[in-house]
Amino acid sequence: MSAGDHLGHLSTVSAYPVLPAAERAEVFRRMARVLPEVAEMDAGLTVHLARRCDE
């Protein structure tokens, strides 16, 4: 994905929206400077299934 799309994805991760606006903007500015033009992302998903045992 493009660096901009990757930053957009990161902006949805709960650790970032809770930062004060100025701090969050600085974090994203710094990340934008070091991200390659295209960033690979492994979008694997682990799902756990829990079952209740009625004994």
Image (cartoon, helix red, strand yellow):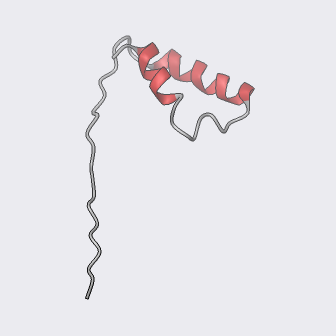
- Position of 50 with respect to 28 (left or right) is left
Q: Position of residue 14 (x, y in %)?
A: 55, 40
* Residue found at the very far front of the displayed protein: 54
**Image vertical order of residue 44 relative to residue 38, above or below:** below
- What residue is shown at x 66% (from left), y 23% (from top)? 26
**Image vertical order of residue 19 relative to residue 9, above or below:** below
Q: Position of residue 9 (x, y in %)?
A: 45, 26
Q: Position of residue 11 (x, y in %)?
A: 54, 28
- Quadrant where the image shows the N terminus: top left
- Quadrant where the image shows the C terminus: bottom left
Q: Position of residue 45 (x, y in %)?
A: 27, 43
Q: How many marks?
A: 0
- Position of 9 with respect to 41 (left or right) is right
**Image vertical order of residue 49 relative to residue 10, above or below:** below
- Position of 44 with respect to 39 (left or right) is left
Which one is in front, 33 or 20? 20
- What residue is shown at x 52% (from left), y 15% (from top)? 33
* Residue found at the very far top of the displayed protein: 37
- What residue is shown at x 49% (from left), y 21% (from top)? 8
Q: Picture quarter containing residue 40?
A: top left
